[in-house]
Amino acid sequence: MTTQQLIEQIQRKKSFLCIGLDVDLTKIPEHLLQLEDPIFEFNKAIIDATHDLCVSYKPNTAFYEAYGIKGWQSLQKTIQYINKNYPEIFTIADAKRGDIGNTSSMYAKAFFEDLNFDSITVAPYMGKDSIEPFLAFHEKHTILLALTSNEGAFDFQTKKVEEIELYKTVIATSQSWHNAQNLMYVVGATKAEYFREIRKLIPDSFLLVPGVGAQGGSLQEVCNFGMSKNIGLLVNSSRGIIYASKGADFAEKAREEAMKIQLEMQDIVNTL
Amino acid sequence: MTTQQLIEQIQRKKSFLCIGLDVDLTKIPEHLLQLEDPIFEFNKAIIDATHDLCVSYKPNTAFYEAYGIKGWQSLQKTIQYINKNYPEIFTIADAKRGDIGNTSSMYAKAFFEDLNFDSITVAPYMGKDSIEPFLAFHEKHTILLALTSNEGAFDFQTKKVEEIELYKTVIATSQSWHNAQNLMYVVGATKAEYFREIRKLIPDSFLLVPGVGAQGGSLQEVCNFGMSKNIGLLVNSSRGIIYASKGADFAEKAREEAMKIQLEMQDIVNTL
């Protein structure tokens, strides 16, 4: 999917909601557990109930790998289901990969070709040649961890590197990499005050914003400081939506939670 | 496996060789391709031919994920084969994971419980709470990227953070984390001159050293600067060993290459 197509979807749906599909078997409705693939059945119901309210789904690969081959199968069925039934959705493999060049090429192949995701999250620590293999793919997007939403973000990311905070150095340096137009960035919503600084460096890039909802960030604050002229935001909520209910009505309740956020977003998109 | 058991294996085998199982279907002998699981059959032959010369195997997960579910099955069969037949081997999942706390817990479950690896490589960018879930596992080891062997290492890792290079800050900070005794570190062999500095910070920790062989590092130089009183090194070679031949003799040739390194190591272990 091109960035322009993503922008069109945001305008059409009046939403920049991304729903995290972080499925934990201990948290899903019990009646699903007797089915052959509870994780996929859960995702399918959530997706069918919310696809018109969001522009993106983001399965976090950890939650699938934790169940071994069965989990990997659930991930494959989920992405295939989205690509087949809702091809307008921007899909994100939240995988936080990154390795030396030939290895990153294998990860890119896994997520962009084999699973056919539109994008993947990657960690910057290993630098340019660990990220460029992802950037080489046409109409695929690489979402670089810049400033994350967890406490550990303050261990290194906000430390000053030659007078400039590391996360800013990561953003500025990455803009010089080959095919940098395919980059997006993870910026945690728990630090809305940083968005203003980030927009000075990358006024137009899309930012994937986790941490709204369960992690405590505020949508309004993120938008005040983080929006670009084309929105330029994908705001993720995982647990707040997908675990809204543990009952038979889980998909309906997930839709209600998604709609609450979409309605807030609609007001914001309409002001543009 | 405990660190003490690893040290005993090094002394017994007079080797601190780690063999990287980075299996690319385009590089393995053609006669294997007609078998049902060529990757596993390749690994099995390499393992049977080299297990007495090395103390560790390190499958890089990218090479398995690139083949989807089939790849994940090959990975599972490989680790099960090692654990069953050669339980004295220290196994490393070269996965370079790291995410917010609840997600890192899922990765830890995937690699330590489901697959039963002894250790996993992790990226430090997200800080303390992204790593501590791995450290919580008893007799499991978490190998933190400190200074990697690729060019991109110079993008951020060697930049000064408040007057200290980032990789040193990563090492020093990580030593304050809960269960830090379960930490090891990735230190690239292409920068042997840095080992001296690193040993000032962590005199005893095990270092996983990629980059000997195909990536150009020298074993002797690594040992001169990087060895601890208990060796404290796992030196990895992947392509140089496993792709020594594309013929029917591939396992035999892999053994020859592994033995060359093991013989060098034997002289070094004997000097202790």
Image (cartoon, coloured by chain):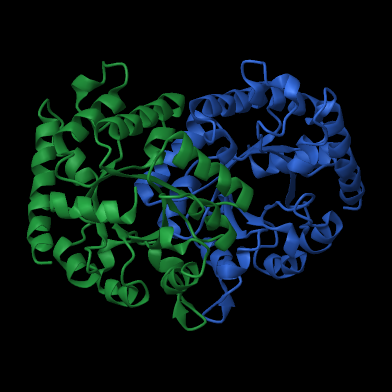
Chain colours: A blue, B green
Quadrant of res A53: top right
Q: Is residue B76 above or below residue B37?
A: below
Q: As displayed, is residue B25 above or below residue B272?
A: above
Residue B155, visible in the rendered structure: yes
Taking the spot 24% from the left edge, 56% from the top edge, the residue there is B7
Quick check: A246 left or right of B120? right
Along the line of sight, the residue nearer the viewer: A204 or B226: B226
Q: Position of residue A244 (x, y in %)?
A: 82, 36
Name the residue furthest bottom: B163
Q: Is residue A142 left or right of residue A224?
A: left
Image coordinates of residue A136 in percent, x first then y, are: 47, 45
> With A39 as the anchor, is B64 left or right in this view?
left
How many marks the image carries: the answer is 0
In this view, B169 is above or below A212: below
Q: Which quarter of the rendered picture does the N terminus of chain A lie within?
A: top right
Give the residue drawn at x 66%, y 16%: A35
From the viewer's side, name the closer residue of A251 and A106.
A251
Q: Is residue B244 left or right of residue A189?
A: left
Evaluate whether residue B213 shows in this view: no
Residue B34 percent coordinates (x, y): 26, 16
Q: Position of residue A121 (x, y in %)?
A: 57, 47
Residue placed most toward the observer, B217 or A183: B217
The residue shown at (8%, 49%) is B260
